[in-house]
Amino acid sequence: MMTALELIAVERRRQIEQEGWTPEHDAREHDEGDIAYTAACYAAPEPIFVHREAECSFFMNSDRGDRQLLREGFYAAWPWDEKWDKRNKHSRERQLVIAGALIVAELERLAALRAAREGSTHV
């Protein structure tokens, strides 16, 4: 029987080899935190909603000088097209393994960015 870390490593390898979600792809295509949001969605036992400004609708309150939110909204945290949302197709354990592998993918992406900034080829 594999350990949790082994299961996550196997899943990350599958994501790269079968799905083509390589570290290079992730660094090039996913720079807005969407991998981390996806990991959180897989890890959560229930749907996650995030608060986002609904059109950046702010006005200045001249009395206090601060900004107040005029319109607000909560949106599903799932960042990608619905066709990629396969959470319901998996057991709870499998969802957590996928979440772990996505966290690894996000860490790899951040390490690659840091290495590029530092002029290093090591990740």
Image (cartoon, helix red, strand yellow):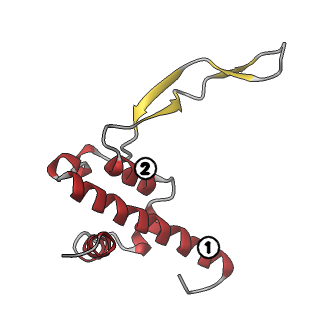
In the image: residue 67, left or right of residue 95? right
Residue 87, image x, y percentages: 23, 49
Q: Residue at coordinates 43% horizontally, 74% vertically from top-left? A: 24
Judging by the rendered image, the residue that carries numbered circle 1 is 114
Q: Nearer the viewer, residue 115 or 39?
A: 39
Three-letter code for the amino acid on which mark 2 is drawn: Tyr
In the rendered image of this protein, does residue 76 appear above or below residue 118?
above
Q: Residue at coordinates 22% horizontally, 59% vertically from top-left? A: 94
Residue furthest to the bottom in view is 121
Q: Residues within 10 Å of mark 2 (few under 14, many from 20)?
A: many
Q: Earlier in the sequence, mark 2 or mark 1?
A: 2
Residue 118, image x, y percentages: 67, 79
In the image: residue 75, left or right of residue 98? right
Q: Residue at coordinates 18% horizontally, 76% vertically from top-left? A: 1
Confirm or deny contact between disc 2 and disc 1 (CB under 8 A): no
Q: Nearer the viewer, residue 77 or 94?
A: 94
Q: Secondary structure at mark 2?
A: helix
Q: Residue at coordinates 38% horizontally, 54% vertically from top-left? A: 39
Residue 123, image x, y percentages: 53, 81
Residue furthest to the left in view is 89
Task: Give the alpha-carbon distance from disc 2 to disc 1, as whole Å.
Answer: 20 Å
In the rendered image of this protein, does residue 17 appear above or below residue 61?
below
